[in-house]
Image (spheres, rainbow, N blue to C red):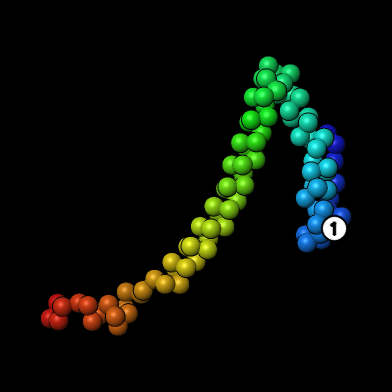
Amino acid sequence: MPKIAAPKHPKCHPDRDLHCQEAIEAEFQSIADRAFQAGRSREEVATALMELADNNFLAMNSNAEMFEIGAGVVLLARKRHSPLLQEDTPRGH
């Protein structure tokens, strides 16, 4: 199995995405070829790889968004002993 090259540039480099594509292209072609050899059509393989990549991207963003929303909920949540909650409670109960 070929080794995937590590990044050579910082994250802000304009060609970093292109270099990543070059680094993983052989592995990408390998899995596409293996799926084709197993009996899948080239179109079927291409569609599956695109959907897997899209789902991976959506999952990454979803996890980050859930963390941000969850952090906001935790920060905004009232505590049970809050004076505001005590004022809302009918007196004598």
Residue 29: x percent and y percent? 78, 31
Residue 29 lies, with reference to residue 89, above or below; the image says above
Q: Is 28 or 82 nearer to us in this picture?
A: 28
Q: Can residue 4 be seen in this view?
A: no
36 sits left or right of 1 in the view: left
Res. 42 image quadrant: top right
Q: Name the residue under label 1.
A: 9
Name the quadrant containing residue 80: bottom left
| Residue 71 place in picture, x, y as percent | 49, 66
| Residue 88 drawn above or below residue 52 | below
Image quadrant containing the C terminus = bottom left
Q: Residue furthest left?
A: 92
**Position of residue 52 measured from the top left corner of the image (x, y, whole percent):** 62, 37
Q: Which residue lies furthest to the top in this view?
A: 39
Whether residue 22 can be seen here? yes
Which amino acid is tagged 1? His
Q: SS class of the residue under badge 1? A: loop
